[in-house]
Structure formats: C-alpha cells, structure tokens
Image (spheres, grey):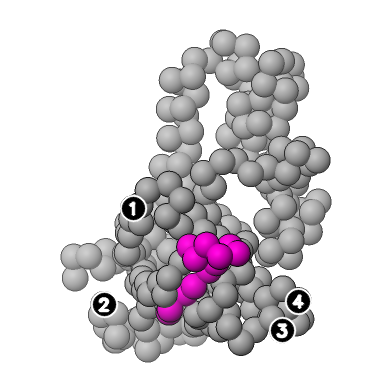
Amino acid sequence: MDILEIKNLEKSFGENKVLKGIDLSAKQGDVISIIGSSGSGKSTLLRCVNFLENANHGSINVCGHEIDCAKENLEKPSKELQDNIIQIRKKLGMVFQSFNLWSHMTILENIIEAPVHVLGKNKKDANRRLRIWIDTFELCESQTSLGNPNKACFGHGIKVCKGACVGDESTKAYNKRLENIQNELAYPLSNMLIIDKGKAQGEQSFIYIKESVFQGYGYFKLNHQIKTVEAIEKRLIPIDNNRDTQAVIRSFLRKQRYKKIINLDTV
C-alpha cells in the first residue's frame, strides 16, 4: 500500500511553471532521492506536499488523507480542509535546507511549535517533556540550544550537566553519550513480538513491533501459534505509536517484565 501518492501535480509562480504534472508514489520503507539543478522545483515539490505552498493542480494523498488541489480552495480552506491538512502534516517530517526558525520566538518555542499546533499538545506539557530529556540524560542546555551557547548552563552550576558548555566534557565524549542514549531508546529487534500474560487463564498477550515501530497489541490462546504476519494482524488491536507508548514498552524491556521475545526475522 502506498503511504504517499502524488498525481499530476502542477505549480506555477506567475508565468513560471515549476512543477509540470509530477507523479510520485512511495511505500513504507522506501528511500527516494530527488535530484535536479537549483531552481528545478525540488523544494517546491516538498513544500506542496506539506501544503506550505499551494499547488495549482493535481492531488496529494498521504496515508489515506487525499486532497485534490484543483477542486479545493487552498487559499481560503474550509474547516474540513484545514483538518485534513493537519492530518497530513501529522504524518510528515521535513528538514529544511535553511533552518527556517521564527525569529520572534525563542529556540524552545520553535521546538514546541509543531507538538502544540499540529499535534494539539498542551504547551506546558511540551515544554515539560523537553526539560525531562535534559534532566534524565544529564544533557547540557547550551548544547541543546535551550540556553546561551556562550555561557555555562544552569545545570552545570548545580552539578547536573557534565560540563560540555565549559569544555569539561569534550564534544566527542558528549556526542558519544548522545549515541548511547539513542541506542538505549531503540528496540532490541526491528521486527518482534513481546509475549506476556493475558487477561484470562489460558491466554497470553503480545505487543507487535514492525520495522522498529509499535503497531498495537492483541491476545491469543496458549495452544495457538502467532508467528506469521497473517496470524498477528488477525488478532491485532492497532494503537498509535506515540512517545508515551514507546517509553512504557522500553521500560518493560529494560526491566525484563515480560515472558519472552519472538524475533520475527528468524521465524
């Protein structure tokens, strides 16, 4: 199933036609490179997909959310169209060629803009979550752009930061710690089932991880086998893959609070 499908997309700036009937589709796991000279429309295409630019013609479908750019009034979108665009943006991530930070906002405000306005998160909660990462992993506020990069951060004064902001911790050592944190937060296997006890006697539960993404959970009888994708998906209760869920799963894995793990790449 295509998670991205673009059909006959066109975009013009005055008399200059930049996108001329672009067709593109992508499935989960695809890696696609778009190559062209400066001004050929690479960035314009990406901006149109994210509705940072309004295409003149064609359709864009992201994970089942489709918008016909010719039929819809993108300049003055209805409430329904705005909601559809938000759903599309929730499924997309974009790294800009330039940083594109809002100059009237602080770094922290720039960072939490998407969680607050796209995902509907509470601003205080988004702020709190960012601070938790710093406190949990003893990160340097200055190195994470939450403080003044030219001064020692507050954490260093209370012996929480390891001193990357004043040269006590080298850049190499700090980056190595970040790499270790990333590894710590990753699942041990890309495709696996985490098996645990069920709700009733004679039943077990499973958590399904596919390509390092949490898919959902389900239950099965002790005398049943669920090692095939078909058997898993037949019993699967889909759940959104959010950070709270990821944190709970990783906590259980670290504490080994489960019966066993099935590596689906070897069955």
Along the line of sight, the residue nearer the viewer: 212 or 34 = 34
Number of labels in the image equals 4
Q: Is residue 254 above or below residue 181?
A: below
* Magenta stretch encompasses residue 206: no
The Cα–Cα distance between marks 2 and 1, rounded to whole angstroms, is: 41 Å
Indicate the amino acid at tag 2.
Answer: Lys
The Cα–Cα distance between marks 1 and 3, rounded to whole angstroms, is: 35 Å
- Residue 28 x/y as whole percent: 36, 69
Q: Find the magenta span and give its range.
A: 6-18
Along the line of sight, the residue nearer the viewer: 60 or 138 = 60
In the rendered view of the protein, which quadrant contains the N terminus?
bottom left
Q: Earlier in the sequence, mark 4 or mark 1?
A: 1
Q: Earlier in the sequence, mark 3 or mark 2?
A: 3
Query: Which residue position is annotated with label 4?
Result: 76
The image quarter containing residue 99 is top right
Q: Earlier in the sequence, mark 1 or mark 3?
A: 1
- Residue at 78 percent of width and 41 percent of height: 105
Q: Earlier in the sequence, mark 2 or mark 4?
A: 4
Q: Locate residue 7 relative to residue 129 in the image: left or right.
A: left
The Cα–Cα distance between marks 3 and 2, rounded to whole angstroms, is: 41 Å
The Cα–Cα distance between marks 4 and 1, rounded to whole angstroms, is: 32 Å
- Residue at 56 percent of width and 65 percent of height: 15
- In front of the other: label 3 or label 2? 3
